[in-house]
Image: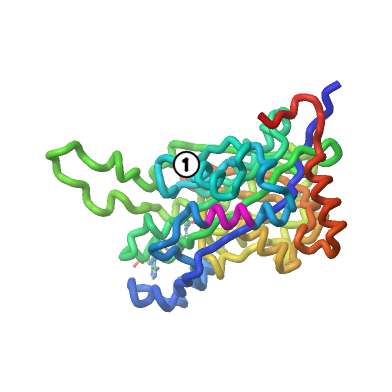
């Protein structure tokens, strides 16, 4: 008899570039002020890649952190999914580069794009591969380096974004299911509200006029995105809770996409959640797009705000338009914090033998 397969969350990790750009730094670039940025967005600083840093490098670092958290050996990873809208290359995919860099030699690998909702979409896809019994260990990464796609002379957009990466490890389990439900939505009619043109398609055929530089930059209708977001977050959380057969009041934490503190506050109030239930590190990192949810989640675990067991709503929104939520039960312990070698070995063995049921393959 085929046993039901749950997706257990066994690791989380994050990485950001070393270079910090403060609001005061931005005052030297555009007509803005620390006071305007802080009161309108909640952002105080963001991390931005230097010339020698890449999306792939950040993804590799976040993946390493998540893998170390879970205590697995990279050789047992079956699939790597990277959610990104700002890859270093159209191909090879970021996921393939990560696969080589971390030594996940048995893993299939692909990128997917759902803008800032990408990590929620990627978690849902990873869960499906595990739930179907196809794979036992899936590494899901969100990474974005929007700084390379911003017009640093446009104060409407350049103040909002930071660069970073975050990752989750999902493992098949007969005894535990940590992704209780997911809910994914899209509305392409709002695509024009937030976009980055592909510089390749923007370039004309040989012999015609080159495009204006603005064609390669992020473009956004901030007001419209704001309105969309404050409705999308509560809708997605309520719908995902309904699918998980829990009430929003039963959630311990809300882990929203980190775009704007006013959006987070308004959405949390609509859901009736208290301040201490909201996970936010936007002030330190800005909007890191597909990375923001695991980056905030990893930070909350490190700070001791989120402790196992906790029921959390991860909720994203962004370009596409896309939005979605995942209701997760967080039960994992950081392998690096286990005190004895025996404890670490036991956890590793448990991870690796979590699911041996029919249908799970490692080809
Ligand atoms: N510094 C100073 N003034 C500014 C700045 C700035 N950085 N940016 C805009 N302004 C000015 C505007 O020019 C405008 O001036 P005007 O009245 O003379 O025309 C004034 O401030 C008000 O501008 P608004 O756009 O109305 O400001 P608002 O209060 O809406 O805040 C903001 C703008 C912060 C962008 C807000 O709309 C927002 O956060 N929207 C959501 C953006 C977002 O989340 N984007 C990403 C989501 S998806 C993803 O993550 C990819």
| Residue located beneath label 1 in the image | 93
Judging depth in this view, the residue of 130 and 286 nearest the camera is 130
- Which residue occupies the extreme left position in the image? 207
- Relative side of 19 to 151, left or right: right
216 in magenta: no
- Tell me which segment is drawn in magenta: 58-64
Residue 163 location, x and y as percent? 49, 60
Q: Residue at x 33, y 60 (%)?
A: 151
Residue 280 location, x and y as percent? 63, 63
Residue 104 makes an appearance in the image: yes
61 in magenta: yes
Q: Residue at x 66, y 41 (%)?
A: 77
The quarter in which the N terminus is drawn is top right
Q: What secondary structure characterizes most of the magenta part?
A: helix
Q: Splitting the image into 4 quarters, where does residue 268 fall?
A: bottom right
- Which residue occupies the extreme top position in the image? 1
Residue 240 location, x and y as percent? 70, 41
Relative to 241, residue 309 above or below: below
């Amino acid at each position: 008899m085929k046993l039901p397969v749950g997706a257990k969350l066994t690791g989380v990790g994050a990485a950001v570039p070393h270079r910090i750009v403060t609001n005061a730094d931005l005052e030297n670039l555009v007509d803005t002020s620390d006071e305007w940025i802080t009161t309108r967005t909640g952002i105080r600083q963001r991390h931005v890649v230097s010339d020698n840093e890449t999306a792939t490098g950040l993804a590799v670092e976040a993946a390493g952190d998540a893998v170390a958290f879970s205590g697995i050996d990279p050789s047992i990873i079956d699939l790597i999914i990277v959610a990104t809208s700002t890859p270093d290359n159209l191909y090879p995919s970021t996921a393939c580069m990560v696969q080589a860099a971390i030594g996940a030699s048995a893993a299939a690998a692909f990128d997917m794009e759902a803008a800032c909702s990408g990590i929620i979409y990627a978690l849902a896809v990873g869960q499906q591969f595990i739930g179907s019994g196809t794979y036992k260990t899936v590494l899901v990464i969100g990474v974005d380096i929007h700084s390379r796609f911003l017009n640093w002379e446009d104060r409407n957009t350049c103040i909002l974004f930071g660069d970073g990466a975050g990752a989750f490890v999902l493992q098949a389990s007969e005894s535990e299911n940590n992704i209780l439900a997911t809910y994914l939505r899209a509305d392409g009619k709002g695509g024009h509200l937030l976009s980055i043109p592909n510089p390749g398609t923007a370039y004309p055929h040989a012999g015609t006029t080159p495009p204006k530089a603005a064609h390669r930059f992020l473009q956004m209708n901030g007001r419209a995105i704001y309105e969309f977001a404050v409705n999308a977050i509560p809708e997605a959380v309520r719908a995902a809770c309904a699918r998980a057969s829990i009430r929003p009041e039963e959630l311990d934490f809300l882990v929203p996409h980190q775009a704007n503190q006013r959006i987070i506050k308004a959405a949390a109030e609509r859901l009736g959640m208290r301040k201490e239930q909201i996970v936010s590190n936007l002030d330190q990192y800005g909007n890191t797009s597909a990375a923001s949810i695991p980056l905030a989640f990893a930070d909350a675990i490190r700070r001791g705000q989120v402790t196992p067991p906790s029921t959390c709503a991860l909720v994203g929104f962004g370009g596409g338009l896309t939005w979605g939520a995942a209701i997760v039960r967080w039960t994992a312990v950081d392998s690096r914090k286990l005190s004895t070698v025996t404890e670490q070995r036991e956890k590793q063995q448990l991870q690796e033998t979590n699911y041996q049921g029919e249908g799970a393959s490692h080809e």
